Amino acid sequence: MVASRKWFEGEKCGLFLLVVFAAGLRLFFLLNYENMPGNATDSIVRAFDMIVNPNLVLNFDGNRSTLFNYALASFLYFWRDPIVAPRVFTLIFGVLLVFPYYGTLKTLFDARIAFLSSLLLVFCPLHIVQSSTATVDALYYFFFFSVCYYFFRYRNGQGRKFDLWIAVFLFNIVSLLRFESWLFIPLFFLLLWPKNKGTAFRFFLCSIVLPSVWLLVNRIMYQDYFLTFNMSAITARAEIAAGTVPYDPRVYSWLIVLWRSSGASMVIGGLLGILFAVFSRKRFELALFFLTLLTAFTVHSCAARMWHTERYSITLALMLIPYAWFFVDRVLALLKIRRTAFFLLILIIPAVEIWEIARKPLVAIPHMFSLMTEDVSSLARWLKKNVRQDETVIIGADRFDVYPSYLMLRGGILPSTRCLIAWNTVPPFKNKEGFEQCLRENRTKYLVLNSESNLQKILKMDLRKKEQNFGGASFENVFERSMPAFGKYIIYRISYREPAGGNKDGQPEKV
């Protein structure tokens, strides 16, 4: 009688260790680093809005991932911690990515390449950051490679037809997480065509269901099918013109971004591996996805529709890593060198590069780390300690470096309807009269003002005075901090000449 195999043997044991290391590193980062960039805080605010004001309207605004906001809101409904819970939510998917990533690469390459590539994923500094940040990225990678796993299992004859329809279902989820995934619809179609033309057409039609709904809703609500892309173009051009975003139109700029975020050996080895795959017509499937996405990023950059940030490069890196190992594997096979031992030796090269990237995270991936100094955190602590649940706060937002949403969340100001973000493009804050009207209508209790902000240019508050009158209200300086490069932040307590709910004579309003 043959003894049954134990779970902790061979491949399963290796996968288990990968998951343990992935969870440990990402949890360490979550506990030791403050990581709450603007996109993350905006998503958390939107999620809490959905909890407080539930409705069935698909909240497509043309520039955000609606599905991610609903998923995050569902998680926060049970755990309403605005700081830790959203990061734990994305951390779960960041860790679980190991399974579909390994499975996809094992299907397309082999177990050795799959394991070594997954090992680099586990220790990738950029993915560690994204896995503990409340942005859509970690979910997108997990679901995208889940699609690839089931799709290629079916295409390569390792799965049933049911696997293909799981891939279709998952792809519709992916299509509402990041819109770049739409580029892959024709690739899936072309890869299925030789196997079964009818199946390829059915896959294509089913894959465009939610993208079509998204376009239709944008047309109905905003009279613009492609609002996302048009808004991105307008925003990017405005920021480039203002000099707030470095812009480099070179066609190889994304390879430079990859070089910085993933290391030279991965870029050089990966590109050589792709050349091997394309010219030999073996294991070229993932290379098609990489080349399509790289081309799209480059075209959008040159058209000033997006700028070069490492955040987006991780998708390219995850496709490129296995081809670096594939290149090494081909070379060793041609030289008839024992591959396993040599693989372990070569692993030292990307390991050293990863260490260098991780050693200086604020230099390598600065935009993924929020610039939350102790001074900014002290503002949030003061708000949390002193602002009551029934009081409204205005936070100046044009000094975006310190993220007003972060102050709101850290200050415990939830739901977000209690906090008015003073964007200089929003009508109440475009001029002095609008600000005064906003004060009267909302009976705002506190104002967080930056000395160098556009709001201060409009209000012209005397920052030297402890108390001053403005717009029928009295402003008392109750807290202030000076921050290098960000000017002075002041919290004003606002009191009104007439009591809330009364008239100027102090008498109750007649109903």
Image (spheres, grey):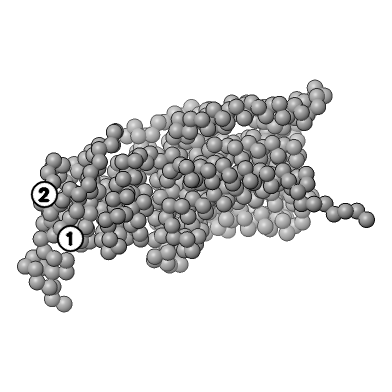
Q: Residue at x 20, y 43 (%)?
A: 456
Residue type at mark 1? Arg
Would residue 373 be seen by someone viewing this image from the given angle? Answer: yes
Q: What is the x, y in percent for residue 137?
A: 52, 46
Q: What is the x, y in percent for residue 138?
A: 55, 47
Mark 2 closeness class: few <14, some 14–19, many ≥20 residues within 10 Å: some
Front residue of 4/290: it is 4
Would residue 148 be seen by someone viewing this image from the given angle? Answer: no
Residue 418 versus residue 478 in the image, above or below: below
Q: Is residue 135 left or right of residue 116?
A: left
Residue type at mark 2? Gln
Front residue of 384/430: it is 384
Residue bearing mark 2: 468
Residue 224 versus residue 250 in the image, above or below: below
> As drawn, which residue projects farthest toward the bottom?
511
Residue bearing mark 1: 440
Residue 263 versus residue 373 in the image, above or below: above
Front residue of 174/12: it is 12
